[in-house]
Image (spheres, rainbow, N blue to C red):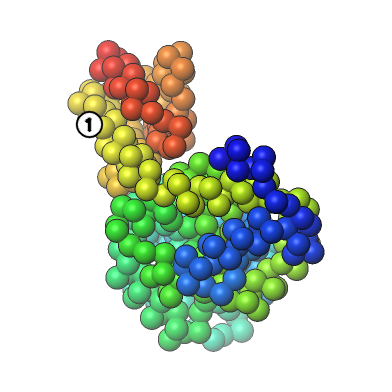
């Protein structure tokens, strides 16, 4: 990947003249069967631009209450789009078509206008959970009947595609816009893409410029993304297998309580009893050069990824077994 970056052909992406960025955008849009794509520094930016291009100030966005766009993007929906959020109580970060239908505001001047539904796949706070595609199809039907747009925060979409044996084209046919991250499971150092129709991406480029996201010789980063798409998708299955190996040990520890179902590469579990707090547990592993994060006083989050080797997993298992 580094060699690909060092040898990338570059130009000025703000003028649309960076060949590596253009290739990455065309390649990704083609994978999903969508018309166009735009490269950005982060998934937060692609999500926020995506939402802004679908909405007007005063509109309402429907999403799960633990959606990344709602709780981890700095209040961006309010700040950037002037919209309010209707957070729904989903399961593992997933909402249903029935919930969406019931959450849509009536055509009433007293109510915010519901214009957009945002889904997240896989669900970060849902422990890497994957939507059933049939439910996504049902949500799309609700959106079509009610003139709503449907956005996907696909931060770990390729993890879901691998785990569920689905195709990018299936998602391109359903969603009005998709944010795809290259810097998580796929292992690129930085970057995400926003996918949609030509007119939508043209509008998105203007918003990206306003947000300060226009880049010049971005092809050095785009080359990493192209390499990741060509070489790393199949490796995600290894990450999923590593996560399950770790869970097999965690379930036997008396200080570990509830563990969210592990479908992909995220492990979220509860620390119980008086042996450790979540922070103390993570600190104990850090002394062994193993990094994880406490996401609350009682919960820990572990993520497997491209740089986690079988030897590292073996060491973690040994450390856990000795705790």
The residue under the point 40% across, 36% down is 304
Rendering coords of residue 291 (x, y %):
46, 25
The residue under the point 51% across, 79% down is 148
**Number of callouts in the render?**
1
Rendering coords of residue 202 (x, y %):
69, 73
* Vertical placement of residue 270 versus 123, above or below: above
Quadrant into which the N terminus falls: top right
| Residue 195 or residue 119, whichever sits in front | 195
Q: Visible in this render: residue 48?
A: no
Quadrant into which the C terminus falls: top left
* Vertical placement of residue 116 versus 253, above or below: below
Q: Secondary structure at mark 1?
A: helix
| Snapshot quadrant of residue 278 | top left
| Residue 30 or residue 117, whichever sits in front | 30
Rendering coords of residue 290 (x, y %):
43, 21
Rendering coords of residue 181 (x, y %):
53, 52
Q: Residue furthest left?
A: 252
The residue under the point 54% across, 67% down is 29
Which residue is labeled 1 in the image? Answer: 248
- Say whether residue 190 is left or right of residue 171: right
Residue density around tag 1, few if under 14, some if 14–19, many if 20 or more, within 10 Å: few
| Snapshot quadrant of residue 252 | top left
């Amino acid at each position: 990947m580094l060699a690909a970056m060092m040898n990338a052909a570059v130009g000025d992406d703000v003028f649309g003249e960076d060949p590596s960025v253009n290739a990455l955008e065309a390649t990704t849009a083609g994978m999903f069967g969508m018309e166009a794509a735009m490269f950005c520094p982060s998934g937060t930016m692609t999500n926020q631009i995506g939402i802004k291009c679908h909405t007007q100030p005063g509109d309402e966005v429907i999403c799960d209450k633990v959606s990344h766009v709602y709780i981890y993007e700095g209040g961006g929906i309010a700040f950037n789009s002037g919209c309010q959020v209707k957070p729904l109580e989903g399961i593992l970060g997933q909402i249903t078509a029935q919930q969406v239908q019931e959450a849509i505001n009536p055509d009433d001047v007293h109510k915010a206008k519901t214009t957009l539904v945002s889904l997240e796949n896989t669900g970060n706070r849902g422990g890497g959970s994957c939507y059933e595609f049939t439910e996504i199809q049902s949500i799309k039907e609700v959106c079509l009947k009610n003139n709503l747009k449907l956005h996907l925060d696909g931060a770990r979409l390729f993890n879901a595609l691998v785990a569920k044996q689905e195709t990018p084209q299936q998602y391109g046919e359903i969603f009005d816009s998709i944010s795809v991250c290259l810097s998580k499971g796929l292992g690129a150092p930085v970057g995400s893409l926003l996918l949609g129709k030509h007119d939508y991406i043209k509008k998105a480029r203007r918003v990206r410029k306003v947000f300060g996201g226009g880049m010049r010789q971005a092809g050095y980063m785009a080359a990493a993304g192209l390499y990741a798409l060509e070489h790393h998708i199949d490796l995600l299955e290894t990450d999923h297998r590593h996560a399950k190996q770790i869970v097999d040990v965690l379930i036997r520890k008396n200080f570990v309580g509830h563990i969210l179902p592990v479908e992909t590469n995220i492990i979220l579990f509860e620390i119980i009893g008086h042996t450790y707090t979540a922070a103390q547990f993570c600190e104990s592993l850090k002394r062994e050069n193993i990094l994880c994060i406490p996401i609350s006083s009682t919960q820990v989050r572990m993520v497997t990824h491209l740089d986690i080797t079988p030897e590292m997993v073996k060491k973690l298992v040994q450390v856990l077994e000795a705790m």
